[in-house]
Amino acid sequence: MIGAPPEKYKAFVMLGAPGCGKGTQGGIMGTIPRFYHFSMGDAFRSMDTRTPIGQEFISYSRKGELVPDELTIRYFKTQIDARADLHMFKPDIDILLLDGIPRNVEQAKLLGEHIEVLQLFHLSCPNRDELITRIRKRALKEGRMDDASEEVIKKRIRTYEEETKELVKFYGDVRSDINANQPPIQVLSDILKVILNHPEWQEFAGVD
């Protein structure tokens, strides 16, 4: 029998600078039963601008204005609810793996109305040269030549640091720092060790 949907969706959050590998880790873990990976970047890229909420985003874009955090969280909620309605995401047995959201403290506060963050995984990659190399390789592989510029990459990293400095503090009680300079399989191992010892995961997985 399918259980009733929870008042708040439970989630693990992946946070890290561009190129740190959070999308890679989320994608791998999303193939494991009882995890559901949600990439906010992918959701934005697939947005239907003909919908009312899509038109709201376009209106800000046309004026060259930043999209309000409230609208971003509202869009996120519609996307997650739609996936739950289609049974792609089963909130009674699945834990969300969030990638790309929240981006700042205000978003985190708004998100708290809908999501219970069980753990924040801060994928730390202090070696900026390594980050730049990773981002450039990805940009060239995907044919995004503008994103391969070192100046553009450094600006993205600076923007990330400015946006998330306070966010990392906000989630201090449930934060796990993960060394993202390691090989991806070691990063995955470190994340899974934390999850396997988390009481909420053990309850979901039926561990005695």
Image (cartoon, rainbow, N blue to C red):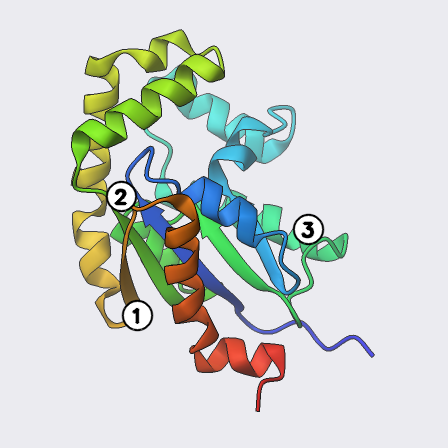
Marks 1 and 2, how far apart at CA? 22 Å
Image-based side of 194 in relation to 149, left or right? right
Q: Which residue is mark 1?
A: 174
Say whether disc 3 or disc 1 marks the residue closer to the N-terminus. Answer: 3
Q: Tell me the number on the disc at residue 152.
A: none
Q: Identify which amino acid the numbered label 3 is placed on.
A: Arg
Q: Earlier in the sequence, mark 2 or mark 3?
A: 3
Name the residue nearer the viewer: 80 or 29: 29
| Residue displayed at 59% across by 77% down | 204
Q: Are marks 2 and 3 in contact (CB under 8 Å)?
A: no
Say left or right for 43 vs 140. Answer: right
- Residue at far bottom of view: 208
**Spatial distance from mark 2 to mark 3, Cα to Cα?**
33 Å
Tell me where residue 176 appears, x and y as whole percent.
29, 64
Q: Upstream in the sequence, badge 1 or badge 2? A: 1
Q: Position of residue 34 (x, y in %)?
A: 63, 65
- Residue 181 circle label: 2
Point out the image quarter for the C terminus.
bottom right
Camera-side residue: 174 or 188? 188
Name the residue at 60% across, 55% down.
36
Q: Quick check: 82 above or below 92?
A: above
- Relative height, residue 64 to residue 24 (above, below): above
Residues at circles 1 and 2 in contact by the CB criterion of under 8 Å: no
Q: Residues within 10 Å of mark 3 (few under 14, many from 20)?
A: some
Picture quadrant where residue 138 is located = top left
* Helix, strand or loop at mark 2: loop
Tag in front: 2 or 3: 2
